[in-house]
Structures are given as C-alpha cells and as structure tokens.
Amino acid sequence: MTFAFLAFALVAAVNPCRLRLVLPDRRIAVALGALIALASVAAIAAAGGVLLDALDVSPESFRLGAAVVLALEGARALVLARPGAEPELAGLGAALVPVAFPLLLSPGVVALAVAAGGDDVEAEALGALVLAFALVLAATLVPRGERSDALLAAGGRLLGALEIAAGVALAVGAIRDV
Amino acid sequence: MRRLLAYTAVFVLGALVLRVAVVPAEVCPPLTPERARTAIAEAAGWLERGVQPAGRYTYGYDREHDVVSGDYNITRHAGVMLSFYQLGRETDDAEALEAGEHGLPLVRANLLRHEGWTAFAEPGQDAQLGASGLLAIALVQRRLATGDDGEDELLRGLGRFLAAQQQPDGSVLGRWSRTTESPVPGEWATFGTGQALYAFALLDGLFPGEGWGERARRLVRYVATRRDDVEGSFLEFADHWSAYGLAELGPEGLEEPEIDYARRLAGILGLNSRLESQSGQGGLNRILRGEPASGAGLGTTVEGLAALWRLSVADPRLSDLTEDLSTRLRCTAGRSVDRQVDPVEAEEAPRPELARGAWFTEGGYTQMDHQRHPLSGLLAALDVLAAEGQR
C-alpha cells in the first residue's frame, strides 16, 4: 500500500464531510479527539503485524477482509448520508466520546491500520491519517446551515462511494498479490 | 453509555464475523525435506502398485464403496508417466523409471499419424491437444532421465501435431477432428494450451534450432496478452502448465508482457494457496469455503508456485516475489503432506494398498492425478527447500 492509496482510502473512511454533520461544535474537543485517535491508530498499526501473526492471517488475506469492511462502511455512508446525533461526554470528555470513538476510529480506519501494520507501512498510514484528520478539522470551519448541510451530505455520499472504490482496489491488490 | 456499549458490541461482533467469514486462520503445517520425501515415496508407491497389464495404471478407487474405477484417460496416463520420469530424473529411482516405461506400450497402441505429425489419441477418437502435449512433456523428461534417444522421432512428431494446431495469432486449438481431418475452429483446451507451451519450450531445449522456440514465444505472448479474453476466463486462470512453460523459457525468452503475466499468475496461485490454507474439512469453514482442494488441486498449486519460484530466482525482474512464492509453496506443500493417507490410516480402508499414499476427496474417491500432481509438486518443493539451505 502506497502513501497515496492510504491517503485516498483513509480520507474516504474518515469521511470529513459526513463527520461534520455530527461532530461537536467545540473545535478543541475535535482536535483532542483527533490526537487520541491518531495515537490509537499508531498503536494498532504498530501491533498489526504481530496481531496478524497471532491470528495466522497473512497480510494479503487481511487486506481482503479490510476491503470488505471499507465496502460495507462506504455503502452505509452512501445510503445514510446524514448520521444521527451522537451523545457526548461532558466537557473535554467529548474528545473521547464521540469524537475519537466511535466517529474517528471507525471500522474502516481500524481495518486499514491493521492492514498497514501487516504490510510494514505504519509511517505512511499515520501520515495519511494526519491528512485525513486535518481535513476533519478543516471541515469544522464550515458553518452549519440548511444549504451547507445538504452540501456536506452530498460530499459524504461521494466519499462513501470513494470508500467503496478504495475497498475494491484493496481487494484487487490482495487478489493479485502472492 | 448504552449507545457506546452498543457501538463496542457492533465493533467486536463485526470483527468476529470478519474473522470467521473472511479471514479465518491460514493453517500451514511445517514442511521438512524428510516429510516431503516420505510423501513422495508413498505417492509413488500408490502409482507403482497400480501398474496393470497392457501398459495401464490403476485409474481410480472409491474407498467408501470399495470399487476400483474402470475408467481410463490417456491424458492422465501421460501425466502419470511424466511424474515417474520426473522422479527418476530427480532421484535416480530405477523403479520409478521402470514404471514410467511400463506406460509406453499403451502410448504406442494409441498413436494417430497424419501429414507428418503424430498425435496421442485413442482409435476412433479425435486428437486432443492436451494428451499429445502432456505426452511430449513426459517423453522429454524420459529423455533427460534416461538419455535414451529412441523416442526422439515420436517426440518430434508430437511437436509437429502441436505446431499443426497453432494458429497465426499464436493460440493452439484444442482438438483435431478425424471427420474433417482438420483442427476444430474456436475450440481450445483448458490445460492443453499451457501444456503445448511447456512442450514447445522443452522441445526447443532438446532440439535447438528446429523452430520450437519461435512457436513457444508466439504462444507465450498469446497466453500472456490475449488468452483470457479469447478463451473466456473472468479471473486469471491458475494455469500451472503455463508456469512450467514460463520457467522453461527463462529470463532470456520472456519480455515485459510475459513478466507481467508471470506476476498475475503468481498472484492467482498465491490466492488459491491462501484460500486453501483457510479451508477446513468441517464446521463453518466447510460451509463458507466448500470442499477442500483435491490432491490434484493441491499438487498443481505447488507445481505452479514452484515453477514461478524457479523463474523468480533466475529473473531479477521477479526477484521480489521469491520469498512470498516460497512461503505459499511451503504452506500448500505442507498441507498436501498432511492430507495424504498414511500407512496406519490406510489399514482402515477395505483395501489398504489402494488407500496408502493417496489423497481422497470428501466423498472417498481418488484417482491417478490426485497422486501424481502432489508427487510432482513435492519433488519441485524439495528443490526449493534445498536451494534455501534445508536438505
């Protein structure tokens, strides 16, 4: 997996447009949540290779599994472009719930982190995730309103479709790899 | 809090479903040279005990109903001869060579000669590409194992039949009709094309300067660039015979389209190996992944991976694949050894001599190619183990 592919797949999996519709308004909580999620992904990616070894799964086979997760998650974003409001912990606790989990640490992001660990491209994955989270922070600058929400929902659908495409590309690569 | 717990539960449940349905454990028993040699000897024993009158070998055996199959197939006959000659060549096993020679009378009794070429075909039957291609491969191995040039003219005749089936685009038609006395248009052979490729490449090595290499290069270009479209394969066809052919042509005989094809072929064989290693004989894996591969399926995967491994060692353009090919090969070869019926297990069969050394399907059936492909595959795996310092 190249940095370019990881950036494409992780931006689609994080889906900043869709997230903007449910993220708390407090930007500091979002930034802190992104840092928590980044640290978690770093740990997951670092343990990815060991985890796959322990499960007797080759990195190529796991990529097929990650592809399924991306495709399902992308389909959900395509169909449900406007997610429901998430309950929040009070104060900066919102950085943990819901920002870090379940919003940023989505199944697709976790699956890609494990796959990156299995392929020894943890650094590339973290770099790509920084880009994706930066887009999430940028999305918080978009003011909410009827028109902007409709645009964000459309963007969320588009990113959902791209997440499906990333899943297909990942699956094709996994099939072609030895 | 309840919602958070629900999310966590969905996460964990999703991971479990993924584990069970998509990425179950890949079980790869260790492959040692000793285990491989024992399995080879047992498989060869099954085939050698099957030597029958009139140059035949035992075709198949149904363990559940204790019935020896009355079927026969001359293409598989040639395949058994090939495995015997490969074994004789690799190990100087005189009994294997003798068993291979035992198949020659049946060959001589089933030759069709026409316009300068010779095909291996039963009387009254059309000539199939695969039977002649595989016989040519077997006879080249015989030549290399024994040094006997007594069948050279037959070899050239078989080569001329394959050449007569070759079309201007490099493809080879799968059947020659006795009725029309010509190749049947639009009909290709699933494995025959790869067998013809390997045969042309071997013939070029044995008889250089006679034009076989040019035919091989035209065919390999067709296989690499057009076969799947023309012959209608959706995914890359896991063609171990083409893998043999690519390895025989070697780096100097292959250009970029063929190297790309070798990569795609390695990918599909690797995928087959991974999926097979995830399969189980019972439980959910059985439902989700179907019946485990037959002995022939296991053996052909190992043969194909081993051929591409040899090519990857010889050709720097593919050297990045060597380690992964070795890993997959060891896994499938190790599983092949595990699945073979050992002498103790064979005692439970109605006829232990027809069970020992065999690979049975779930339905309790085995046939000659279920033994001969693992034999050839494990022989090739021994080369990989030896090259990697494990003798």
Image (spheres, rainbow, N blue to C red):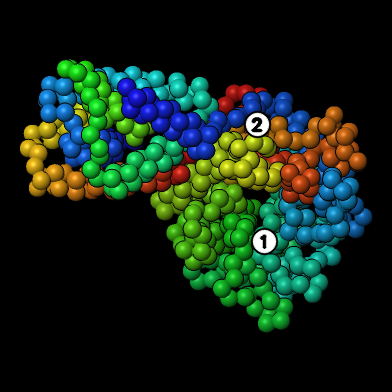
Nearest to the observer: residue B27 or residue B37: B27
Q: Dot 1 falls on which chain?
A: B
Residue B349: image quadrant is top right
Percent x, y for residue A6? 29, 35
Percent x, y for residue A44? 36, 22
Residue B128: image quadrant is bottom right
Nearest to the observer: residue B145 or residue A39: A39
Single out the mark in the foreground, 1 or 2: 2
Q: Is residue B73 left or right of residue B23?
A: right
Q: Taking the image as drawn, is residue A146 in sight?
A: yes
The residue positioned farthest toward the front in the image shown: B2
Q: Dot 2 falls on which chain?
A: B
Percent x, y for residue B91? 75, 35
Give the residue type that dot 2 points to: Gly
Nearest to the observer: residue B13 or residue B330: B13
Tag 2's secondary structure? helix
Q: Quadrant of the C terminus of chain B?
A: top right
Q: B387 above or below B221? A: above
What residue do we see at 82% from left, 56% from top? Answer: B104
Task: Name the residue carrying label 1.
Answer: B130
Q: Are marks 1 and 2 in contact (CB under 8 Å)?
A: no
Indicate which disc residue A131 carries: none
What residue do we see at 58% from left, 36% from top? Answer: B278
